[in-house]
Image (spheres, rainbow, N blue to C red):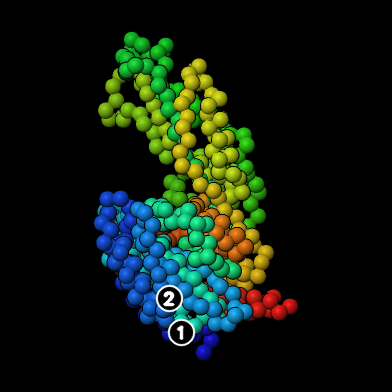
C-alpha cells in the first residue's frame, strides 16, 4: 500500500482525535483556568502512547504550562533524527457572538472542521500523530517530539532550549506551526519578521485647559503625538524611518484580491505602501499604532489635552538585529520636536526574526515530500508573524536544518472568529511529513556513505 493510501485509511481516526482535542478549551492566558491545558496535555500523552511512542517525558518550567518531550529512537545507527514541534494551547476565543458555532464545540463544515485552535495548532499536532500511525510507531528516522502548552502567551520555554541542548539534539526540525499560502498550494516558510514594541509619550500641561481660552497657544499633547506619528510613513504609506531594512521579495505572494479578502479591506479603501506585497509584508518593515491613550470622543471635553501616549508595534526584516531595529525607531522618535515639544520614548519587548538556510538535504527532501503530499510544486513564502521558540531551538542545535510547514492555510482564520481547518490540507500534510521522513532518511544515509 502506498503512503497516500495508508494515510487515507487513518483519516477517520485523525478527524475524531482532532475533534476530541479541539473540544478542550486549552487557553494558557492569565485569567483562564489551567485545568483544560493539563487535560489537553494528558490526552496527547495518551495519543502518543497509543501511536507507539514509549519514551515520553514532561518538562516543567516556572510559570509555564507543561511541555511534552517524547522520543522515538533511530531505527539504525546511520539514521538521522528529526525534531517535530507543535503547541497544544490556543488563543482565547474573543467575542463569541462573532462565531457561527461555539468555539469549543468542534463543528463540521464543508470539507473541514471549525473550532478555536483547530488550525493553530492542533491540526499540526494531529499531523505528527498521523505520521506515527502511518509508520506504526517505527518511522525511518529517530524522532524527538516537542509539544508545548503556552506558545500563544509566551513562557520560560522560549529561552530554555540553549540551556539544555542535548534534549533537543537533532539533524533537522519540522516546526509545524505554519501552513500554506492558500489551500492546495504546498508552502515552505523561509522567513519570519522580527517584532518590537515602543511606547511614545507626551506631557505638555499640568492638567486640561479650556480650549476656547487656551487653544491656539497652549501645546496640545494629542496634536504633538499625531504630528510625531505622521513622520513614520511617507505620502504612499511606506516606512519613512531611515535604516530599517527592506529588500525585494522574490518568492510567492498573495494577489491583491486575495490579500484584500484576507485582511477584510473595505471596498474602495486602497492598500498602503508601494512595491510588491511580499516586500510590504515580509522583507520590509511595518510600523503599526496598536494602542493610543487619548480622551474618548463620547466623553470629550472642550479642553486642550495635556497628556497622550501611543504603543507602536514594529515588524522588521528577518535578518535585521532586533535591538538595532528597535533602536532606529527610538532614535527617530527621540530626534523629533513637534511644535518644539520633546517626546518620551520607551523601549518595550523585542524579538528576533528568523531566516533558515534552504540549501541542505532536509530542504531538498521537503520539497520532494510536499510535492508528493499536494501533487504540485511547493511555494516559498515568508511570514510577518514570529515564533520566538524557533530562535531558541536554532541556538540549541545550530547545525540542524529548520523547516516550517503544516496543515494550516492563510484563509483558516487563525486568531480570529470561526477558525477552521480543511481535511484535504490535513491529509496532504500527513502524507508530506511522512514522505519527508522517508526522503530525508534516504538522503542522509546516501550522504553518510558518499
Residue at horizontal 35 percent and vertical 29 percent from the top: 294
Q: Residue 193 vs residue 90: left or right?
A: right
Provide the residue designation for mark 1.
136
Residue 352: x %, y % from top left: 54, 48
Residue at horizontal 32 percent and vertical 70 percent from the top: 42
Is residue 119 among what the camera can see? no
On-image quarter of the C terminus: bottom right
Separation of marks 1 and 2 at Cα, in angstroms: 15 Å
Q: Residues within 10 Å of mark 1 (few under 14, many from 20)?
A: few
Is residue 199 among what the camera can see? yes
Which SS class for mark 1? loop
Q: Contact, CB < 8 Å: mark 1 with mark 2?
A: no
Residue 224: x %, y % from top left: 45, 23
Residue 374: x %, y % from top left: 54, 73
Which SS class for mark 2? strand
Q: Quadrant of residue 201?
A: top left
Q: Quadrant of residue 93?
A: bottom left
Residue at horizontal 41 percent and vertical 78 percent from the top: 54
Residue at far top of view? 213
Judge by depth and name the residue closer to the eye, 171 or 424.
171
Looking at the rendered structure, which numbered label has been put on residue 152? none
Judge by depth and name the residue closer to the eye, 432 or 167.
167
Judge by depth and name the residue closer to the eye, 218 or 359.
359
Provide the residue designation for mark 2.
55
Residue at horizontal 56 percent and vertical 73 percent from the top: 81
Q: Residue 291 vs residue 98: left or right?
A: right
**Mark 1 vs mark 2: which is more N-terminal?**
2
Amino acid at each position: 500500500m502506498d503512503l497516500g493510501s495508508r494515510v487515507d485509511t487513518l483519516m477517520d481516526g485523525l478527524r475524531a482525535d482532532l475533534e476530541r482535542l479541539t473540544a478542550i478549551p486549552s487557553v494558557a492566558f492569565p485569567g483562564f483556568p489551567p485545568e483544560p491545558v493539563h487535560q489537553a496535555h494528558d490526552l496527547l500523552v495518551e495519543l502518543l502512547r497509543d501511536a507507539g511512542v514509549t519514551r515520553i517525558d514532561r518538562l516543567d518550567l516556572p510559570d509555564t504550562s507543561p511541555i511534552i518531550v517524547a522520543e522515538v529512537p533511530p531505527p539504525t545507527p546511520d539514521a538521522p533524527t528529526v525534531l517535530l514541534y507543535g503547541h497544544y494551547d490556543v488563543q482565547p476565543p474573543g467575542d463569541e457572538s462573532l462565531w457561527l458555532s461555539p468555539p469549543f464545540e468542534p463543528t463540521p463544515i464543508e470539507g473541514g472542521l471549525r473550532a478555536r485552535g483547530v488550525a493553530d495548532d492542533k491540526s499540526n499536532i494531529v499531523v505528527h500523530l498521523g505520521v506515527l500511525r502511518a509508520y506504526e510507531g517505527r518511522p525511518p528516522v529517530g524522532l524527538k517530539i516537542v509539544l508545548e502548552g503556552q506558545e500563544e502567551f509566551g513562557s520560560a520555554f522560549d529561552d530554555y532550549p540553549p540551556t539544555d541542548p542535548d534534549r533537543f539534539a537533532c539533524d533537522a526540525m519540522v516546526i509545524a506551526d505554519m501552513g500554506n499560502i492558500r489551500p492546495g498550494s504546498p508552502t515552505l516558510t523561509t522567513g519570519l519578521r522580527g517584532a518590537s514594541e515602543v511606547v511614545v509619550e507626551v506631557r505638555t500641561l499640568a492638567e486640561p485647559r479650556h480650549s476656547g481660552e487656551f487653544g491656539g497657544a497652549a501645546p496640545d499633547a494629542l496634536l504633538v503625538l499625531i504630528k510625531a506619528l505622521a513622520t513614520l510613513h511617507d505620502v504612499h504609506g511606506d516606512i519613512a524611518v531611515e535604516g530599517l531594512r527592506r529588500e525585494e521579495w522574490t518568492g510567492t505572494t498573495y494577489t491583491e484580491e486575495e490579500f484584500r479578502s484576507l485582511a477584510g479591506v473595505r471596498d474602495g479603501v486602497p492598500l498602503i505602501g508601494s512595491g510588491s506585497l511580499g516586500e510590504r509584508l515580509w522583507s520590509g518593515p511595518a510600523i503599526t499604532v496598536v494602542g493610543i491613550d487619548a480622551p474618548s470622543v463620547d466623553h470629550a471635553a472642550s479642553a486642550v489635552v495635556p497628556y497622550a501616549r501611543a504603543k507602536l508595534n514594529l515588524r522588521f526584516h528577518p535578518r535585521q538585529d532586533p535591538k538595532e531595529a528597535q533602536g532606529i525607531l527610538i532614535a527617530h522618535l527621540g530626534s523629533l520636536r513637534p511644535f518644539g515639544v520633546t517626546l518620551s520614548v520607551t523601549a518595550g519587548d523585542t524579538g528576533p526574526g528568523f531566516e533558515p538556510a534552504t540549501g541542505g538535504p532536509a530542504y531538498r527532501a521537503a520539497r520532494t515530500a510536499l510535492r508528493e503530499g499536494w501533487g504540485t510544486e511547493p511555494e516559498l513564502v515568508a511570514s510577518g508573524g514570529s515564533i520566538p521558540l524557533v530562535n531558541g531551538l536554532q541556538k540549541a542545535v545550530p547545525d540542524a536544518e529548520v523547516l516550517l510547514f503544516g496543515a494550516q492555510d492563510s484563509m483558516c482564520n487563525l486568531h480570529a472568529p470561526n477558525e477552521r481547518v480543511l481535511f484535504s490540507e490535513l491529509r496532504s500534510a500527513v502524507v508530506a511529513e511522512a514522505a519527508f521522513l522517508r526522503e530525508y532518511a534516504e538522503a542522509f544515509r546516501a550522504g553518510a556513505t558518499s
